[in-house]
């Protein structure tokens, strides 16, 4: 045992020295920083980032696409503060809306303000990585109570229906009760937890290498796929759940259905010069649910925008990518601009219900 003690001691000391050296080196590099959940506060139980702070983000092991920006007083990424009671446009979504992968002026919310002729600080975004359909409704209720939405845009992405059955702290999930959703309480993190998440080695491993317990212990064998596509089917309970969500969304925002736009993100086609596209995936439960939701939204008078045909036409026309695949599947500035233009056109189509809703706010810009 004593013969092994010294080599093991040297090995342990070497490992500690290597980790300390890596920590010092990584702290000098643009690895993700400042992208951390804030402690819960009364009146806003939903997940948000640490208010009044700065962040840095980058992608991949080589630290590509470095971005830096501001987290405002409300805990969302924006270069301006949110004002209680403000009459503003509202954009709700997940990491596509949260926006630390692109400069803020190129994001959907900023481009939308520009396309509608509004000052940038008249469009508030409520984007959170990992959010899903029930969380969008929960945040809509919070935003509708604290601000005065003039219109709202909600981005619906793949996985948003089924991921709503998860239980992530700080996020709303589906519930069988009369409110349809419930919040999973956010954790109040202690000093040690906050110190640990500030370690550069951990931030690099999680943010750039995407390492987690799930990825470390995942099987290396590919799962077998069915040779014949059998599309999933929605149960009656699924349809009731989605119908209730659809009816509750405009009410949560105190808006008529015509002032709400649902954006359905689809496939991101690669430029013509890229490799041939893979065969289309067999529709799963979430795909079928989102397609049903879009049809019902159209029938209910809620405006919808589907990104798939917009992106396909744009890529065929100018051969420019709309995301940073394979490094990052989120929209790049070109993708954001295309979606913002389509949403602005949808919002610019005025109806009597729109004009009635805008009355009494003559000092505010339109739409």
Image (tube, grey):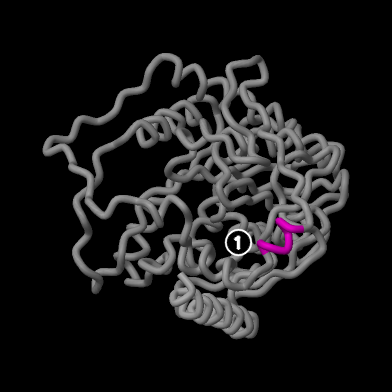
Res 64 seen here: no
* Dot 1: element: loop
Main secondary-structure element of the magenta-colored stretch: helix
Q: Is residue 26 above or below residue 109?
A: below
Q: Residue at x 64, y 85 (%)?
A: 28
| Residue pointed to by mark 1 | 99
Q: Residue at x 59, y 59 (%)?
A: 108
Residue 120 falls in which quadrant of the image? bottom right
Q: Residue at x 75, y 50 (%)?
A: 189
Q: Is residue 321 left or right of residue 230?
A: right
Res 127 seen here: yes
Residue 356 falls in which quadrant of the image? top right
Q: Is residue 361 left or right of residue 101?
A: right
Please identify the quadrant where the N terminus is shown: bottom left
Magenta stretch: residue 6 in it? no
Q: Nearer the viewer, residue 122 or 100?
A: 100
Q: Is residue 174 left or right of residue 279?
A: right
Q: Residue at x 75, y 41 (%)?
A: 149
Q: Nearer the viewer, residue 337 or 26?
A: 26
Q: Is residue 313 left or right of residue 95?
A: left
- Residue 124 at x, y percent in the picture: 73, 53
Seen as rendered, the residue at the extreme front is: 2
Mark 1, residues whose alpha carbon is within 10 Å: few (<14), some, or many (≥20)?
Answer: many
- Residue 162 at x, y percent in the picture: 45, 33
- Residue 58 at x, y percent in the picture: 54, 73
Q: Is residue 226 above or below residue 309?
A: above
Q: Is residue 51 above or below residue 60?
A: above
Magenta stretch: residue 196 in it? yes
Per the rendered image, the range of residues in magenta is 192-197
- Residue 14 at x, y percent in the picture: 52, 82
């Amino acid at each position: 045992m004593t013969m092994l003690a010294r080599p093991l001691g040297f090995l342990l000391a070497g490992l500690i020295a290597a980790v300390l050296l890596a920590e010092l080196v990584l702290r000098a590099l643009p690895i993700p920083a400042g992208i951390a959940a804030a402690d819960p506060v009364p009146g806003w139980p939903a997940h948000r980032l640490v208010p009044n702070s700065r962040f840095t983000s980058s992608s991949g092991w080589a630290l590509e696409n470095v971005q830096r920006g501001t987290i405002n007083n409300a805990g969302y990424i924006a270069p301006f503060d949110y004002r209680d009671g403000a009459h503003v446009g509202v954009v709700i979504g997940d990491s596509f809306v949260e926006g630390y992968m692109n400069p803020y002026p190129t994001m959907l919310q900023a481009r939308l303000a520009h396309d509608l002729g509004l000052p940038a600080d008249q469009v508030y975004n409520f984007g959170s990585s990992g959010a899903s359909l029930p969380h969008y409704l929960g945040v809509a209720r919070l935003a509708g109570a604290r601000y005065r939405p003039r219109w709202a845009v909600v981005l619906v992405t793949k996985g948003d229906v089924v991921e709503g059955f998860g239980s992530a702290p700080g996020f709303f999930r589906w519930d069988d009760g009369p409110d349809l959703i419930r919040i999973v309480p956010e954790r109040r993190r202690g000093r040690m937890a906050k110190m640990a998440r500030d370690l550069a080695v951990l931030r690099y491993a999680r943010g750039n290498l995407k390492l987690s317990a799930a990825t470390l212990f995942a099987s290396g064998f590919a799962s077998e796929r069915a040779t014949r596509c059998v599309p999933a089917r929605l149960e009656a309970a699924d349809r009731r759940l989605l119908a209730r969500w659809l009816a509750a969304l405009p009410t949560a925002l105190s808006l008529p259905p015509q002032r709400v736009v649902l954006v359905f993100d689809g496939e991101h086609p690669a430029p013509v010069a890229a490799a041939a596209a893979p065969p289309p995936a067999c529709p799963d439960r979430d795909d079928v649910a989102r397609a049903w939701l879009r049809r019902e939204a159209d029938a209910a008078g809620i405006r919808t925008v589907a990104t798939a045909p917009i992106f396909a036409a744009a890529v065929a026309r100018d051969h420019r990518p709309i995301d940073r695949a394979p490094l990052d599947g989120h929209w790049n500035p070109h993708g954001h601009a295309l979606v913002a233009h389509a949403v602005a056109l949808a919002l610019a189509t005025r109806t009597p219900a729109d004009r009635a809703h805008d009355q009494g706010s003559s000092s505010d810009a339109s739409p």
